[in-house]
Image: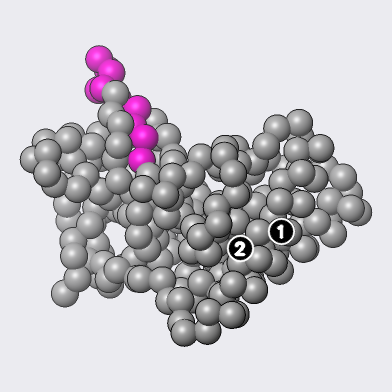
Amino acid sequence: MGELLPLFPLNLVLFPGVILPLHIFEDRYRSLVRDLIALPPESAREFGVVAIKVGYEVGERGVQTIQRTGCAALVTEVTAHLDGTFEIVVIGQRRFHVERLDPDADYLRADVEWLPDTIGDNEAALAAAATTARGLFDSYRRRVQELRGDDILDGPTPTDPVDLSYTLAAALVLNLAERQALLETRDVVARLRLGVHLMRAELRAISAIPSLPANSMARTRWSPN
């Protein structure tokens, strides 16, 4: 049996290192936040973010099916309001796979298996994939900035291959299925190569139709911590 983790289904894919603000207003998720802030200071105030496969974020029967691969979110800031709602800020941590759901609590929980990244022994392949991805992403950033007038990423492009792979996944203008595919890719070289493939497709689309939809995680804030 894996580690028991509270789950928060959303219409997005969270990646390790990505900073995400959330407004908490539903009773079950208010209960989740209250339980987390009641933990001892030395405890990790974490819950799992999973993308909704079928259904909606809001409502008692809104979420019908979730993706089985998600990302743990560490709560770093909490602001409580008089009406019982919260504003929180989380940072994506590590990936997990849902082994078994526990639907009987006030909010959804699951036994999860943690999914470490796989790097492999081929350092040359890793370096080559990272160099290609970084160079193409810098070009992609400039092109998007020309179209939208703002940058898609706060700060410089990461140099670490693992961090770079998640930055690409979060910052590119992708649909939910594409983001989920990147999250589920365990091998870093494969994730970088998939990111490059998707980036090239986006650049071709931009060349054909020079406009972009808003990124669901527009202006990605990223932290290595």
Q: Is residue 30 left or right of residue 123?
A: left
Q: Find residue 94 and report its image quarter.
A: bottom left
What residue is at 47 percent from the left and 70 percent from the top?
184
- Along the viewing direction, whichever of 89 and 106 lies nearer the viewer: 89
Q: Is residue 76 above or below residue 225?
A: above
Residue wearing tag 2: 178
Q: Is residue 34 above or below residue 43?
A: above
Q: In this view, does 200 lie to the left or right of 13?
A: right
Spot the residue most to the left.
40
Circles 2 and 1: CB distance less than 8 Å? no
- Along the viewing direction, whichever of 194 and 12 lies nearer the viewer: 194
- The answer to whether residue 52 is magenta is no
Residue wearing tag 1: 135
Q: In the structure shown, which secondary structural element does the residue marked by tag 2 occupy?
A: helix
Q: Is residue 136 left or right of residue 208?
A: left
What residue is at 21 percent from the left and 44 percent from the top?
45
* Quadrant for the N terminus in the image: bottom left
Q: In the structure shown, which secondary structural element does the residue marked by tag 1 occupy?
A: helix
Q: What residue type is labelled 1?
A: Gly
Crowd class of label 1 (few under 14; some 14 to 19; many from 20; radius 10 Å): few
Residue 210 x, y percent position in the rendering: 87, 45
Q: Find residue 36 and report its image quarter.
A: top left
Span colored in magenta: 80-90
Residue 23 in view of the camera = yes
Crowd class of label 2 (few under 14; some 14 to 19; many from 20; radius 10 Å): some
Spot the residue most to the bottom.
121
What residue is at 25 percent from the left and 34 percent from the top?
30
